[in-house]
Image (cartoon, coloured by chain):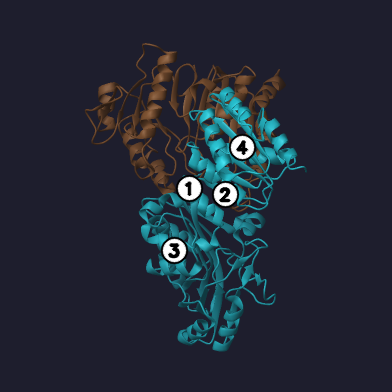
Amino acid sequence: MSILVDKHTKIICQGITGKSGLFHSQQCRAYAKEHRPGEDVFVGGCTPGKGGTEIDGFPVFNTVEEAVKKTGANCSLIFVPPPFAADAILEAADAGIGLIVCITEGIPVLDMARVKRAMVTSKSRLIGPNCPGIITPGVAKIGIMPGYIHKTGSVGLISKSGTLTYEAAWQLGNIGMGQSTAVGIGGDPIIGTTYIDLLAMFQADSKTESILMIGEIGGNAEIQAAEYIKAHVTKPVAAFIAGATAPPGKRMGHAGAIISGGSGTAAEKQAALEAAGVIVAQSPADMGIAVKRAIDQRK
Amino acid sequence: MKIHEYQAKQLLAAAGVTVPRGIVARTADEAAAAYQQLGGAIAVVKSQIHAGGRGKGTFKQHAEQRGVVLVKAADAAKDNAARMLGSTLVTIQTGPEGKVVSTLLIEEGLKIVRELYLGVVVDRESGGPILIASTEGGMDIEVVAHKSPEKILREPFDVEAGLRGYQARNVAYRLGLEGPSVRAAEKLLRQLCQFFIDRDCSMVEINPLVVTDDGNLVVGDAKVTFDDNAMFRHQDLLPLRDLTEEEPMEVQAQASGLSYVKLDGNLGCLVNGAGLAMSTMDIIKYHGGAPANFLDVGGGANVEQVTEAFRIILADPNVKGILVNIFGGIMKCDTIVTALLTAYDKIGITIPLVVRLEGTNVELARKMLADSGKPITVGTDLTDAAKKAVKSLGA
């Protein structure tokens, strides 16, 4: 088992005729071919107005609805530019796509508020936006991460950041640990899937034995996650919080990474996690080791 | 994007919100004329900078002069304006370097009965906009939130429907408003929340919201910030940006698609990815150094971007060394080293440079660095690189 992604996942890309959309669709397809030769995992894409064509072997459809009908897709990877991304997410949800992964960075925050509101009654799950995507090593890569650094294993990885996730996967690989599933939840103020959603999934997943949570300054999602861990998570959890040196009131790259009104600091998040029994890496070089320590502590 | 108080009030007035009569002045004579034109006995002369705490702030050139003053005569308006304009106002929010005042807002004096607080922001928890109100107007809301959180009212509202009438009335009654003020508040609160939505704001703060002796509600001070990601659909707001209020290097970085924030340290850093960039700052501090900046070159990291990134880092005279931390994923390490070496030659870097690379084609990339013959120190891992970089400063 793993979470969110399994061998039944069939992926399309919204925005597949764009440069990034095509490149990453090719990468995801290549990953699937390498790990599951002969299976059809990445089944096509959508770009309005380009339906009926083909791009590098991917069939292109005008609408997600049509793509679902023709390919049986149940997962969509979104590379649509920011002004149209909210619409693309809702189109996927309306077409019955179960798992929507939005990579797009720079979506207006109120557009995401509208998406969040519209999806209250939807059965679809949104990951992101402004995230690297999801990977279940050896099964499927739905995102922009370099596939080979994610080894198969039993660590459930949740992160707000892209390259920092790669760094963590790399560190884990160096000490012989891999991931059950790695999920980038995104660095925006309003996101589809939260730490708590994923902590619950990893806690319930038989393949996952420990959890690494990577957070950053801004908001209080990590503090809520700490409370959840304390009450509901029995598996060992390690964490790292980026931005201990970030000045207040300044946005650090991610739209959501800002200390405002003296809250959302790394220190308060670290303290909350430690109070919940989480092993918190003080240095970003120690994320892998922290997972090992969290596991060893339970032995 | 931040704007000035006078600009915020003009926009709010256009949206139907009651603001004091006010006139913008850029010279002392204009300030005196504005006082005359307003025609009242009392006027307020307000420095326009992108920072709060102006009323208590003082000027570097005139220690006795405050950033906001009440005046009762045209001459007083003129004298105060003369001291304020062109001088540097230092407030609790500007930092010790302060900000130069080039614009004043001259407003009619209000007959203040009460001062309330209103704010509208995006609430991450409810995933939508939220109205925040308090009876403690005129105070720093963060202090109120800390000392007496029970005095803060929070009313999330629907991004499609806006603040509903009953929600506005609930807030009005809870603020202790009575009689005609309740109706006035209902109207103003709903207009304010609609303005927040219509203009894609990330923050609207009215502090204080003044209750006048006739029961009316007037915007005392207004702070408005727009969502940078939504500016594409608000082209009309772009001219309101005041570049003189922003860190020049941050503006330049933004124009080149880089994300840069200046800090106070002396070790520059160049990183790909926001999370890794923050972490790089953290690990520098962890090993006893002080980061000079946050800099995310993004996923592309081509020659132009890396060159520009080095230029921006080196423009800070405090920078005595640079740490490059790149995790090459899809973007291969050798591609990045090519960009790095080209940029190195173009710019002529003379301070210590430590490079840490990891990821795709890292062996080839490290060999390229070693073969380049340049005095570049290679860090074997994150910790090693951070230690070497801190040490290279000779601290």
Q: Can you tell which of label 3 and label 1 is closer to the viewer?
A: 1
Mark positioned earlier in the residue sequence (1 or 4)? 1
Residue at mark 2: chain: B
On the image, which quarter does residue A298 sit in? top right
Q: Nearer the viewer, residue B364 or B386?
A: B364
Residue at mark 4: chain: B
Q: Tag on residue B256?
A: 1
Amino acid type assigned to the residue bearing label 1 in the image: Ser
Where is residue B222? Give x, y as percent. Answer: 50, 66
Where is residue B388? Give x, y as percent. Answer: 72, 35
Reply above or below: B247 against B256: below
Give the class, few, some or many, for how many residues have Cα within 10 Å of label 1's Cα (few <14, many ≥20): some
User: Mark 3 falls on what kind of element?
Assistant: helix
Amino acid type assigned to the residue bearing label 3 in the image: Leu
Residue at mark 3: chain: B
Asked whether residue B341 is in view, the answer is yes
**CB within 8 Å, label 3 to label 2:** no
Residue placed under numbered mark 2 in the picture: B312
User: Mark 1 falls on what kind of element?
Assistant: loop
- Chain B drawn in what color? cyan
Residue placed under numbered mark 3 in the picture: B240
Amino acid type assigned to the residue bearing label 4 in the image: Val
**CB within 8 Å, label 1 to label 2:** yes
Asked whether residue A219 is in view, the answer is no
Q: Who's the residue at 54% across and 59% down the image?
A: B246
Mark positioned earlier in the residue sequence (1 or 2)? 1
Q: Tag on residue B236?
A: none
Measured Cα–Cα span from mark 3 to mark 2: 25 Å
Measured Cα–Cα span from mark 1 to mark 4: 18 Å
User: Mark 2 falls on what kind of element?
Assistant: helix
Where is residue B395? Give x, y as percent. Answer: 78, 43
